[in-house]
Amino acid sequence: MSNTQNTTTFFILTVTLENGEPFFSYTNQDGTPKSGNVTISQHCTITYQLNDQTGKGLKFVGAAFTTPFDNIIDAVSICNNGSLIHLTDLDEVAGNTSFQFVLSNSANTLQVLSPDPEFVNHPEN
């Protein structure tokens, strides 16, 4: 789990195919493997850049939360034609939340769900 006290945390989400199924892995910008989980201790934006190695034209279309009203993540935005997704955490509420990335693909109209990274808030206030 990455711990951030900066205003921006950046991950690269690489998706490959293993036996025809999507496989998700996370790294820092320098290529160091990470879990994709984040512990927050102040207001920040967490950015994931998609590295699609499937040949299926994957793009971020959103993030799905099982607890969308817990105020752990305050906003989600997609940029660069679906290659970046930003999750904004104002760090006003203690707790944790899990979600799944939702990706479209150019092979068909079905959507792909990622395994669930986790955010843990430890507010300073």
Image: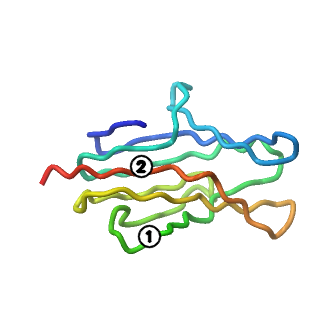
How many numbered marks have been drawn onto this rendered protein structure?
2
Q: Earlier in the sequence, mark 1 or mark 2?
A: 2
Q: Is residue 87 left or right of residue 83?
A: left
Instruction: Find residue 65 and report its horizontal and vertical position in percent.
Output: 50, 67
Q: Of the residues tagged 1 and 2, which is closer to the observer? A: 1
Instruction: Find residue 118 and report its horizontal and vertical position in percent.
Output: 45, 50
Above-or-below relation of 4 to 120: above
- For the residues marked 1 and 2, what is the alpha-carbon distance in whole angstroms? 18 Å
At 37% from the left and 52% from the top, the residue drawn is 45
At 20% from the left and 52% from the top, the residue drawn is 123
- In the picture as drawn, the residue positioned furthest to the left comes out as 125
**Residue hosting label 2:** 46
Tell me whether circle 1 and circle 2 mark residues in contact (CB < 8 Å): no
Q: Which mark is residue 122?
A: none
The image quarter in which residue 104 lies: bottom right
Which quarter shows the N terminus? top left
Q: Residues within 10 Å of mark 2 (few under 14, many from 20)?
A: many
Instruction: Find residue 41 and report its horizontal and vertical position in percent.
Output: 24, 46
Amino acid type, callout 2: Ile
Determine whether the residue tagged by mark 1 lies in a helix, strand or loop: loop
Amino acid type, callout 1: Thr
Determine whether the residue tagged by mark 2 lies in a helix, strand or loop: strand
Instruction: Find residue 34 and report its horizontal and vertical position in percent.
Output: 51, 33
**Residue hosting label 1:** 67
Above-or-below relation of 35 to 74: above
